[in-house]
Image (tube, coloured by chain):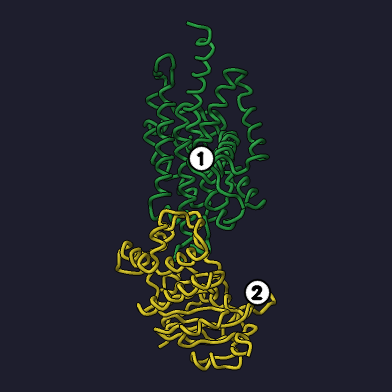
C-alpha cells in the first residue's frame, strides 16, 4: 500500500485554479519528486497535503487515513513532516529551542535528547550554533534547521519544498547528500524541485505543468523524457 | 543636616516609593504585553479583569472574612477562566493582527464587564485591607507601607515566574514559536489555538493577581479598570510591547516618574509627564526599550 495517495486533487485560490485533478501515490521508501517550473502548482500540492490550504475537490490519504479537513498540526501528528518554502524557522527562538519545541512525545518512544542527538549527528553545524537565534543563521544553516526540525517527530514522510533554493551548489549538494542519508534511515521523501538534477536522488515522480500532471513515471523515464530535455537541458 | 540632604531625601523617598508602586504597574502590564506579543491582541478589557481581581479581594475580605492575600490563587484561577472564555468567544477571531474591529471588540467587552460589576457590586468604592495594612517599615531615613512592599514582592515573583515559564518550559517555547510563526508552528505539530488560549488565560490570570494585590492598599470601584489602563499601556509602550521583563521595568519607570512628579510638582498632575513620554516613545521609539522588532 502507498504511504501517501493523492487522487484527483484540485485547489483554487478564488477563481484561479492552481492545481487541477492531480493524482499520484508515494510508496514507502521512495524518493518521489514533484518537478515543474515556477507556478506549476508544486507548493500548493504540499500545502494542501499539510492542510494549510483547503482542497476544492479530490482526496488525500496517508497510511490509509483520510486527511480531509485535518488541521495542519494533525497532519504533522500523523507523521507527515513539511519543510516549507522559505524555511520558516522560528527566528526569535534559539536553534536548540527550534528543535526541542518541534518534538512531540506522542510520536515516538525515543526521548527528546535522542531526537536532538540524531539531528546533530546529521547536521553537526546545528550543534555548534545551538544557542544562537534561528534568525541569525545563514541560508544553508536555516535549511538544515528546517529539515532538523521536521525530523524531530520521526516522520514517516518528509516533504521538502525546494530545499536547494538560494543555496550555493556546495551547500545544495550537502543538503541532497543528507536527504539520501535520511532516506537510508527509513524515511520516505516527497521532494518538490524546479531543478532536474534532483532526479539523481529520485526513485519516481511526476512532472507538473500549469497545475496538471504532464508526465508520471520512474526516474529514468522522467530523465529521458522530451519534457525534461527541453525544459531543463536545453537540447 | 546639610541643605542638599534635606532636598534630596524627599526626592529619594519618592523614587523608592515609585519603585514599589511601579512594580504593581509592571504586573498589570506584563499580561497586556503577553497578549500583544503572542497574539497581537491589544486587550482593552485587561484593566477590567484587574478590577475584577480587586473585587475578588473585597469578596474574600468582607464576605468570607479571610485575608485578601490568601485569595491570590483563587483570583488567578478565576480570571484565567474568564480570560479563556473571552478568547474562545471573542479574541480567537483576531489572532495575528491588531485591527480596528479587534480594538472595538475589546473596548465593548470591557464596558460590558464594567456594567456587570456595577450591577453586582454597586458603584461605591470598596477596599480590602490585608494583614499588613497600616504597618510601616523604616529603612534608614525612608519609610514604606508594608502592604506596598508585599505587593512589590508578589509582582516581582510573578514576573520572574512568567519569564522562566516562557524561556524554560516546553509550553513556553511553544507559545514563543506560535508568536513567531503560527503556520510553521502548526506544521511541526503545535496546536496553535490551544496554545494561544492558554497564553491568553495566563495573561488574564496575571491581571487577577495584580488586582487582588492592589486592592490591599488602593480602593476599587467598577471604573477602576478603565482608569488603570492608560498606565498599563504607557508602561508596556515604554518597556516594549511583547516583552514581559520590559513591561515590568516600564511599570517601575512609570511609578518613579509619577511619584517624583507628585512630590516635586503636584499630585493632581502626577500622570502628565507619563502622557508626554508616551507621545515621545510613539513618535521616536515605538518598539520601546526592550520591544520586539515591529513589522
Which chain is painted in yellow? A
Q: Under tag 2, what secondary structure?
A: strand
Badge 2 is on which residue? A13
Query: Which one is nearer the viewer's eye here, A11 or A142?
Result: A142
Q: Residue B62, percent across and down?
A: 42, 30
Residue at the spot 38% in from the left edge and 76% down from the top edge: A181
Badge 1 is on which residue? B246
Q: Residue B24, percent across and down?
A: 48, 33
| Residue B274 location, quadrant | top right
Q: Residue A8, percent across and down?
A: 56, 86
Q: Residue B266, percent across and down?
A: 62, 19
Query: Which one is nearer the viewer's eye here, A178 or B284?
Result: A178
Q: Marks 1 and 2, how far apart in space?
A: 42 Å
Q: Is residue A193 visible?
A: yes
Would residue B133 appear left or right of A44 to someone viewing this image? Answer: left
Q: Under tag 1, what secondary structure?
A: helix
Residue at the limit of the structure toward the front, as seen here: A170
| Residue B173 location, quadrant | bottom left
Residue at the limit of the structure toward the top, as seen here: B1
Work out whether B83 lies above or below A62. Answer: above
Work out whether B82 lies above or below B226. Answer: below
Chain B colour is green
Work out whether B62 lies above or below A159. Answer: above
Quadrant in the picture for the N terminus of chain A? bottom left
* Label 1 Cα neighbours within 10 Å, binned few <14 / some 14-19 / many ≥20: many
Quadrant in the picture for the C terminus of chain A? bottom right
Q: Chain letter of disc 1? A: B
Amino acid at each position: 500500500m502507498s504511504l501517501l495517495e493523492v487522487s484527483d486533487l484540485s485547489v483554487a485560490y478564488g477563481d484561479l485554479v492552481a492545481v487541477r485533478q492531480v493524482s499520484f501515490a508515494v510508496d514507502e521508501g521512495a524518493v518521489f519528486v514533484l518537478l515543474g517550473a515556477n507556478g506549476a502548482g508544486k507548493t500548493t500540492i504540499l500545502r494542501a497535503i499539510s492542510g494549510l490550504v483547503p482542497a476544492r475537490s479530490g482526496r488525500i490519504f496517508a497510511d490509509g487515513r483520510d486527511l480531509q479537513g485535518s488541521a495542519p498540526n494533525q497532519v504533522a501528528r500523523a507523521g507527515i513532516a513539511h519543510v516549507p518554502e522559505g524555511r520558516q524557522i522560528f527566528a526569535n527562538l534559539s536553534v536548540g529551542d527550534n528543535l526541542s519545541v518541534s518534538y512531540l512525545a506522542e510520536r515516538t518512544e525515543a526521548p527528546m535528547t535522542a531526537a536532538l542527538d540524531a539531528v546533530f549527528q546529521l547536521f553537526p553545524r546545528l550543534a555548534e550554533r545551538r544557542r544562537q537565534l534561528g534568525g541569525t543563521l545563514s541560508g544553508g544553516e536555516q535549511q538544515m534547521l528546517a529539515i532538523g526540525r521536521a525530523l524531530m517527530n520521526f516522520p514517516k514522510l518528509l516533504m521538502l519544498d525546494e530545499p536547494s533554493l538560494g543555496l550555493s551548489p556546495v551547500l545544495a549538494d550537502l543538503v541532497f547528500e543528507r536527504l539520501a542519508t535520511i532516506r537510508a534511515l527509513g524515511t520516505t521523501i516527497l521532494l518538490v524541485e524546479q531543478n532536474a538534477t534532483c532526479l539523481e536522488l529520485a526513485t519516481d515522480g511526476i512532472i507538473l505543468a500549469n497545475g496538471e500532471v504532464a508526465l508520471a513515471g520512474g526516474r529514468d523515464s522522467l530523465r529521458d523524457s522530451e519534457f525534461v530535455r527541453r525544459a531543463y537541458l536545453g537540447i | 543636616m546639610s541643605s542638599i540632604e534635606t532636598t534630596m531625601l524627599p526626592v529619594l523617598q519618592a523614587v523608592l516609593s515609585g519603585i514599589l508602586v511601579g512594580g504593581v504597574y509592571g504586573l498589570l502590564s506584563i499580561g497586556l504585553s503577553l497578549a500583544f506579543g503572542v497574539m497581537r491582541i491589544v486587550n482593552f478589557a485587561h484593566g477590567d479583569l484587574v478590577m475584577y481581581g480587586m473585587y475578588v479581594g473585597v469578596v474574600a475580605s468582607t464576605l468570607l472574612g479571610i485575608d485578601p492575600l490568601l485569595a491570590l490563587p483563587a483570583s488567578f484561577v478565576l480570571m484565567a477562566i474568564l480570560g479563556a472564555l473571552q478568547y474562545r468567544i471573542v479574541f480567537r477571531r483576531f489572532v495575528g493582527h491588531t485591527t480596528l474591529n479587534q480594538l472595538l471588540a475589546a473596548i465593548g467587552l470591557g464596558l460590558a464587564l464594567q456594567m456587570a460589576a456595577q450591577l453586582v457590586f454597586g458603584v461605591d468604592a470598596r477596599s480590602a485591607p490585608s494583614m499588613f495594612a497600616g504597618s510601616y517599615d523604616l529603612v534608614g531615613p525612608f519609610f514604606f507601607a508594608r502592604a506596598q512592599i508585599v505587593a512589590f514582592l508578589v509582582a516581582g515573583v510573578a514576573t520572574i515566574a512568567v519569564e522562566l515559564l516562557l524561556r524554560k518550559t516546553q509550553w513556553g517555547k511553544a507559545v514563543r514559536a506560535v508568536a513567531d510563526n503560527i503556520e510553521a508552528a502548526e506544521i511541526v505539530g503545535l496546536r496553535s489555538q490551544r496554545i494561544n488560549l492558554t497564553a491568553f488565560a495566563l495573561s488574564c490570570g496575571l491581571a487577577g493577581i495584580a488586582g487582588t494585590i492592589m486592592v490591599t492598599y488602593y480602593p476599587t470601584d467598577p471604573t477602576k479598570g478603565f482608569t488603570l489602563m492608560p498606565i498599563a499601556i504607557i508602561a508596556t509602550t515604554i518597556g516594549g510591547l511583547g516583552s514581559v521583563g520590559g513591561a515590568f521595568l516600564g511599570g517601575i519607570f512609570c511609578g518613579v516618574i509619577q511619584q517624583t512628579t507628585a512630590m516635586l510638582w503636584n499630585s493632581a498632575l502626577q500622570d502628565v509627564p507619563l502622557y508626554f513620554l508616551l507621545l515621545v516613545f510613539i513618535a521616536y521609539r515605538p518598539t520601546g526599550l526592550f520591544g520586539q522588532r515591529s513589522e
